[in-house]
Image: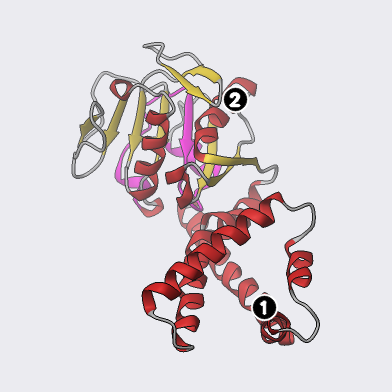
Amino acid sequence: MSGANGTTMAAEGADFSAGPLWMIGCGNMGGAMLRRWVAAGLDPASVTVITRSGREPLPGVRALVGLPLDEEPATLVLALKPQQIDQVDLRHLHPALLLSILAGVEEAALAARVPGAGAIVRAMPNLPVAIGQGVTALYSAGADDAARTAAAAFATPLGHVEWIDDEEAFGAVTALAGCGPGFVFRFADALAGAGIALGLPQDQARRLALATLAGSAAMAVDADVSPAILADRVASPGGSTREGLNVLDADDALARLLVETLAASARRNAEMAAAARG
């Protein structure tokens, strides 16, 4: 995708011209994404961040409290809170690519706010993008191949990338992958807490819980069988792992809890989508 200043960003061996990039909102997620993009080769001088504070998120990045006058971005990234989308008027802008990480805000709602956008791509990253090991789901009904390639190039330095075919599934993807790190962090804390309840020192229990999760996740990613099979393989009949799994499996307790957890997140996504439709 060509931009006004021809800035080139490298992502996993692929180059594309990003041009001037404006990011509206730059909280935890937006800031994490921007840091990864700069590490991947995006020129900070090509970036303008617009936030209420006007604080510079990275050296060399232009930080403003309002939209620049008489300028246009080649790429516009919406990284503010979904409920803040109508606090800034974007109707006069004509970005070649609009990339939105606003949970629950559908493509049609984005098009109504930025009617001059050449292509609109919804993205749902999760927090591990900060270390390049996140998940970013992408969706677009109308983007052409060039825009999809550009969007994927932005997502690639962040970790695993998945295109979603049906926008109605985007809420479920957000609940699973977008919200998932929060649920994993809670599980890690509970696992450590259970070790503490058995008498382990607090710091040691937390170290053991995190190392166990990290190793198990890496093993599951590389395995040629499902996590369910891995769980059964590590659980010898009559052994201590099997006894613990019997508690988690009783009445599908863990499975039901997670279904309810993701359903609650998906409902909230649907509520935000309805609010954005007006």
State the residue at coordinates (75%, 65%).
230
Kindly identify the amino acid type of the residue bearing the numbered disc 2. Thr
Residues in magenta, as a range: 84-113
Above or below: residue 134 compared with residue 59: below
- The residue labelled by disc 1 is 256
Residue 173 figure quarter: bottom right
Residue 95: within the magenta? yes
How far is the residue under mark 1 from the one under mark 2? Answer: 38 Å
- Discs 1, 2 touching: Cβ within 8 Å: no
Residue 149 tag number: 2
What x and y, as percent, mark residue 131? 44, 44
**Residue occupying image coordinates x 58% and y 59%:** 215
Position in image of residue 273 (x %, y %)? 51, 55
Of callouts 1 and 2, which one flags the residue occurring earlier in the amino acid sequence? 2
Number of residues whose C-alpha sits closer than 10 Å to that of mark 1, classed few (under 14), some (14–19) or many (20 or more):
few
Query: Foreground residue, 259 or 104?
Result: 259
Seen at 26% across and 31% down, the residue is 67
Q: Residue at x 79, y 52 (%)?
A: 224
- Which of the pair 220/250 is nearer the observer? 220
